[in-house]
Structure formats: structure tokens, C-alpha cells
Amino acid sequence: MAPDPLVRLQAVSKIFPGGIVGLDAVDLDIISGEFITLLGPSGCGKTTSLRVIAGFESPSSGKVLLDGRDITTLRPFDRPVNTVFQDYALFPHMDVAENVGFGLSLRKLSGAEQAKRTGEALDMVGLADKIGARVSELSGG
Ligand SMILES: Nc1ncnc2c1ncn2[C@@H]1O[C@H](COP(=O)(O)OP(=O)(O)OP(=O)(O)O)[C@@H](O)[C@H]1O
Ligand SMILES: [Mg+2]
């Protein structure tokens, strides 16, 4: 039997004001550990799909499920989902460690746990030496 999807879009439509169709009954299953790329022409709904999963847009109809749980009406910060934006992803007034650890501080993890996980995340992407750097000192990527 196929595993249950981690993320499921069930007949998700998004109609923007003025009747602009952003998504038209989209079905999408993403299995845990699967690497998915959305590929399609400009305006086909890639960004809108990601925004619906993150909760930045609410569907006009249809459902968003995470691990079998209906999260369609949950606010973005109540969903265990993260978005890495291409631009404007960093808080300029925080250093690298504070930016990386921000979500952990919202979740009220202890300082030691935040420091540990922040260090691990930076290690993973080869940026451990930038831990105290200012955002303005980093390269774009
Ligand atoms: N806030 C909005 N208000 C009105 N229409 C919108 C809004 N956001 C997206 N749309 C429309 O919804 C459709 C899907 O847009 P979306 O941004 O999801 O496309 P995309 O696949 O990400 O395109 P691109 O490859 O250009 O990034 C387009 O017709 C777009 O103009
Ligand atoms: Mg887009």
C-alpha cells in the first residue's frame, strides 16, 4: 500500500478578487522525504500553491492536509510548515544565529536547545563560521 502523503492538496481552488483563477481544483500529494519541483508556465499557480500550503493564502474551496490532519483554516504560524523565500528572507536587525534560531525562539525552546539546533543547521549548510555575522555581510545565496 502506498504511504499516506505528508502534504495533500485536495481539489484546491483559489479565486482572487476580480474572478482571477489562481488555482483550479488542484490535487497534489507529497510523500514524506519526497523532493518535489513545481514546474510550469508563468501564472500557472506555483507560488499560489506554496502560499496555500504555508497558509498565506486561504483556498476558495478544497482542503489542505498535513499528515492526514486538515490544516486548511490554520494560521501560518500555527502550522508546522516552513517557507524559505527567495528574497527578503532575513531580518536585517538580527545576526545569522538570531535569524536561524528565530522560529525556535517563537516555539520557546530553551536557550541551550536553540543554540544547539542553530549550530547544527548552520553546520549542515557549511555556514558555521558565519554564526555571528550581520546579514549585510553575507553573499546573496
Ligand atoms: N494576490 C493576487 N491577486 C490577484 N491575482 C493573483 C494574485 N496572486 C496571484 N494571482 C494570479 O494567480 C495566477 C497564478 O499566479 P502565481 O503567482 O501562483 O503563478 P506562478 O506559477 O507562481 O507564476 P511565476 O512563474 O510567474 O512565478 C496568475 O494569474 C496571477 O496573476
Ligand atoms: Mg511564482
Image: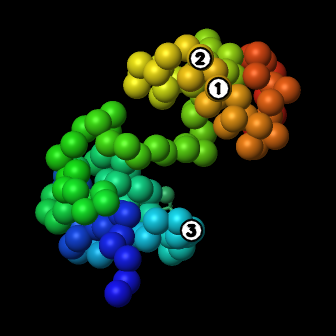
Q: Quadrant of the N terminus?
A: bottom left
Residue type indicated by callout 1: Lys
- What colouring style does the render use? rainbow
The foreground one among 104 and 89 is 104
Residue type indicated by callout 3: Phe
Indicate which label's residue lies in the foreground, 2 or 3.
2
- Residue 35's disc number: 3
- Tag 2's secondary structure? helix
Q: CA distance from mark 2 to mark 3?
A: 31 Å
Q: CA distance from mark 3 to mark 1?
A: 26 Å
Quarter of the rendered structure image containing ligand 1: bottom left
Q: Earlier in the sequence, mark 3 or mark 1?
A: 3
Q: Quadrant of the C terminus?
A: top right
List x then y, in percent, for residue 56: 32, 43
Image position of 132 with respect to 84: above or below: above
For label 3, being within 8 Å of ligand 2 is answered no
Image position of 10 with respect to 18: above or below: below
Q: Are marks 2 and 3 in contact (CB under 8 Å)?
A: no
**Residue 56 appearing in the image:** no
The residue that label 2 is drawn on is 112
Residue 51 located left or right of residue 123: left
Q: Are marks 1 and 2 in contact (CB under 8 Å)?
A: yes
The residue that label 1 is drawn on is 116
Q: Residue furthest bottom?
A: 1
Q: Earlier in the sequence, mark 2 or mark 3?
A: 3
Query: Toward which corner of the image does residue 92 lie, by quadrant?
Result: top right
